[in-house]
Image (cartoon, grey):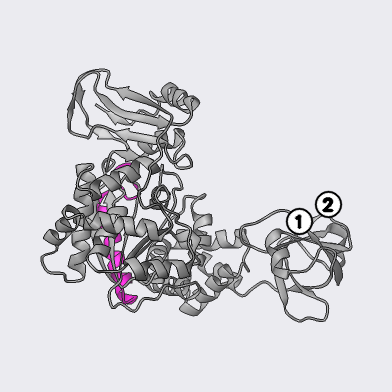
């Protein structure tokens, strides 16, 4: 069937979508979500699209293409093309197999991942795959196969060094910006540490959001390689480079549904580490109320799985279980966290953030059999070498030689209304208030925490300060403080 191309100014963020008129669809017995192959006249190679059907905005002699499909086909609007029906990819059968509770082999998983990368699966079909992994679980064999397939079907960083270090934190603790302290410490001691990090999804800031206060984080693969070979380290946004792209597509489905299948979570983390060229990885699993891993028992179970899978991947790891019962550091929000990081690297800063960063860096050096690592980590900070290395990384990524941290226009102190002892500081509520203030989009917005759990406080003590560029945001937080009060005393 020959039809004229019409550009539709809508984007899917992935799958290739074509829209046909109802009468056109009936002529060839085509239904919504069926697939069609579209190609230029007299040219065999083309694109495969999932179909939508409509009688509005599209004529019988037209085929409407969403932005991804239009740009991939690469023809002017109005060009006549040839369209034929196409069978669904075989990966659909494998997804059904997983939904039925059957184990998939490496070839079947690789076929699914290839189709995810090539946008051959619709969002619904991808959601079914995630659902199958969530309800039926992934075996160790499936998890290993999924990890390898994600790595093999995306871009990779390759370094000549025998040792390349990396770290990951399972997350949920407000503040906790240890990565930005650990990377310059490790890099200053002569080890490579290319760190690709995430942006905030529901929290006040991700590592990439905080680093972006100091330097650009959206960099190409070649630029990242150049920076790491020059400085030994980087702190960049993982979404800015096509490492483990299949995982990024699965994450877009997992997060709105709040589905984190354990096997898929392990594959996601370890694939990103392998794709970044890591040989040795430290995994930090904080546990406690309000973070992703609630109990020490859950943390230990997850730790065992990490060791099992990483052994099969020829990846040397060390898992540490850490206290996630309250925020770490004072600043919660990109600029406030960046200030904490630079302060620690200059030999000052919040003590809990400093101590955890030192602990993580020391454990990473133990993983590579570095002798007497703690004094070396302490000396890297106290001598100023780690701070100097951080400034070097910032400049290499395109930041200023002397970073200027933005400040919010307005602030408001929340004071204790009585004497007491702080028994709990809620990570989720702290993050909630910081996001209400405008973080992470407004870099200067957030919270500066001035107290810690298990400390006595007196009436009138400032517990935390809200920073925002909007008085309206501060007023909204003040009205809702009883409902979202983050501090129990």
Q: Quadrant of residue 168?
A: bottom left
Left or right of residue 71: residue 92: left
Q: Which one is in front, 282 or 210?
A: 210
Which comes sooner in the sequence, label 2 or label 1?
1
Q: CA distance from mark 2 to mark 1?
A: 9 Å
Left or right of residue 220: residue 169: left
Q: Which residue is mark 1?
A: 8
Q: Which one is in front, 250 or 226?
A: 226
**Where's the C terminus, which quadrant?**
top left
Q: Total marks drawn? A: 2
Q: Which residue is mark 2?
A: 57
Vertical comparison of 86 with 470: above or below: below
Q: Position of residue 45 (x, y in %)?
A: 73, 79
Residue at x 35% of width, y 28% of height:
485
Left or right of residue 25: residue 209: left
Residue 311 painted magenta: yes
Q: Quadrant of residue 388?
A: bottom left
Residue at x 41% of width, y 70% of height:
225
Q: Position of residue 382 (x, y in %)?
A: 16, 53
Q: Which one is in front, 414 or 395?
A: 395
Question: Is the residue under label 1 in contact with that under label 2 (CB below 8 Å)?
Answer: yes
Whether residue 174 is visible here, answered yes or no, is no
- Which residues lie in the magenta part? 288-315
Q: Tag on residue 363?
A: none
Residue 300 painted magenta: yes
- Between circles 2 and 1, the one closer to the viewer is 1
Residue at x 41% of width, y 39% of height:
406
Q: Position of residue 365 (x, y in %)?
A: 20, 65
Left or right of residue 302: residue 218: right
Q: Crowding near pointer 1: few (<14 within 10 Å), some, many (20+)?
A: many
User: Which SS type dominates the magenta stretch?
Assistant: helix
Residue at the farthest front position: 401
């Amino acid at each position: 069937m020959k039809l004229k191309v019409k550009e539709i100014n809508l984007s899917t963020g992935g799958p290739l979508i074509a829209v046909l008129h109802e009468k056109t669809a009936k002529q060839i017995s085509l239904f919504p979500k069926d697939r069609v192959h579209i190609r230029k006249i007299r040219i065999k190679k083309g694109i495969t699209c999932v179909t939508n059907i409509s009688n509005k905005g599209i004529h019988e002699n037209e085929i409407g293409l969403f932005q991804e499909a239009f740009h991939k086909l690469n023809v002017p609007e109005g060009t006549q093309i040839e369209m034929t029906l196409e069978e669904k990819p075989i990966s659909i059968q494998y997804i059904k197999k997983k939904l039925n509770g059957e184990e998939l082999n490496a070839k079947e998983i690789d076929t699914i991942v290839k189709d995810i990368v090539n946008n051959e699966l619709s969002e619904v079909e991808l959601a079914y795959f995630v659902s199958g992994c969530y309800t039926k679980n992934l075996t160790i064999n499936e998890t290993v196969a999924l990890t390898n397939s994600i790595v093999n079907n995306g871009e990779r960083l390759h370094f000549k060094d025998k040792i390349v270090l990396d770290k990951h934190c399972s997350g949920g603790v407000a503040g906790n910006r240890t990565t930005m302290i650990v990377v310059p410490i490790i890099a200053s001691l002569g080890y490579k540490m290319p760190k690709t990090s995430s942006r905030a999804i529901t929290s006040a800031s991700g590592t990439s959001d905080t680093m972006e206060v100091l330097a650009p984080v959206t960099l190409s693969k070649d630029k990242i390689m150049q920076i790491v070979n020059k400085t030994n380290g980087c702190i960049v946004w993982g979404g800015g480079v096509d490492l483990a792209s299949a995982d990024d597509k699965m994450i877009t489905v997992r997060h709105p549904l709040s589905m984190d299948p354990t096997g898929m979570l392990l594959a996601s983390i370890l694939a990103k580490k392998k794709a970044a060229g890591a040989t040795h990885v430290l995994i930090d699993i904080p546990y406690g109320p309000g973070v992703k891993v609630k109990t020490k028992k859950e943390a230990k179970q997850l730790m065992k799985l990490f060791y099992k899978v990483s052994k099969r991947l020829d990846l040397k790891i060390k898992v540490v279980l850490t206290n996630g019962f309250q925020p770490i550091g004072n600043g919660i929000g990109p600029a406030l966290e960046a200030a904490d990081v630079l302060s620690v690297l200059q030999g000052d800063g919040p003590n809990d953030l400093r101590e955890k960063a030192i602990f993580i860096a020391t454990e990473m050096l133990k993983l590579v059999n570095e002798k007497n690592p703690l004094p070396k980590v302490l000396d890297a900070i106290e001598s100023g070498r780690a701070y100097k290395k951080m400034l070097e990384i910032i400049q290499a990524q395109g930041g200023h030689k002397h970073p200027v941290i933005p400040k919010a226009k307005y602030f408001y102190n929340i004071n204790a209304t009585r004497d007491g002892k702080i028994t709990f500081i809620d990570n989720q509520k702290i993050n909630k208030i910081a996001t209400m203030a405008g973080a992470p989009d407004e870099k200067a917005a957030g919270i500066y925490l001035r107290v810690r759990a298990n400390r006595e406080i007196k009436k009138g003590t400032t517990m935390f300060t809200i920073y925002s560029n909007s008085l309206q945001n501060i007023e909204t937080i003040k009205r809702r403080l009883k409902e979202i009060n983050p501090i129990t005393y």
